[in-house]
Amino acid sequence: QVQLVESGGGLVQPGGSLRLSCAASGSIRSIIAMGWYRQAPGNERELVAKITSGGSTNYADFVKGRFTISRDNAANTVYVQMNNLKPEDTAVYYCNAVQNVRWQEYVYWGQGTQVTVSS
């Protein structure tokens, strides 16, 4: 089992910045990737960015050049630095972890943190 706790959401003006954190606990050694997804009202949940245990990163086109995902292995924490935020970035942001146990993958989600971009 993996537990994920997000923090760092809030209200920010357009053009502003936020950093979200996701702390993982539990069976963290078997985590192969962690990432951030978001879901706006009426929309499906979509990938924002992810980072593998090997350090490879992947970003959605709509955040490239604005968001940066990183991790602190010692703290078992993944971050996403969000710059130049736009009103369309408003959503609930969810942390995600993929665990591989005996070649079976399990997916875990955090509780979500609200990000609102508005003047």
Image (cartoon, rainbow, N blue to C red):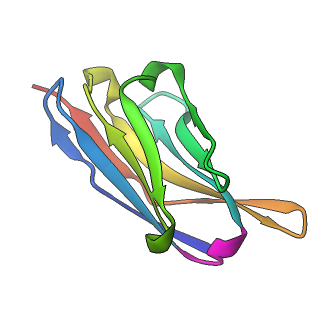
The span shown in magenta is: 25-30
Q: Residue furthest left?
A: 119
At a point 61% along the width and 72% down the height, the residue shown is 2
Res 104 quadrant in image: bottom right
Residue 82 or 43: which is nearer the viewer? 82
At a point 49% along the width and 60% down the height, the residue shown is 110
43 left or right of 15 in image: right
Q: Quadrant of the N terminus?
A: bottom right
Q: Quadrant of the C terminus?
A: top left
Res 103 quadrant in image: bottom right
81 left or right of 32 in image: left
Residue 42 or 39: which is nearer the viewer? 39
Image location of residue 34, percent across then percent down: 59, 53
Image location of residue 58, percent across then percent down: 59, 34
Image location of residue 15, percent across then percent down: 18, 24
Residue 78 to residue 24: above or below = above
Image location of residue 69, percent across then percent down: 46, 43
Q: Is residue 26 magenta?
A: yes
At a point 52% along the width and 38% down the height, the residue shown is 49
Q: Residue furthest bottom?
A: 26
Q: Is residue 35 magenta?
A: no
Residue 43 or 36: which is nearer the viewer? 36
Q: How many marks?
A: 0
At a point 67% along the width and 74% down the height, the residue shown is 29
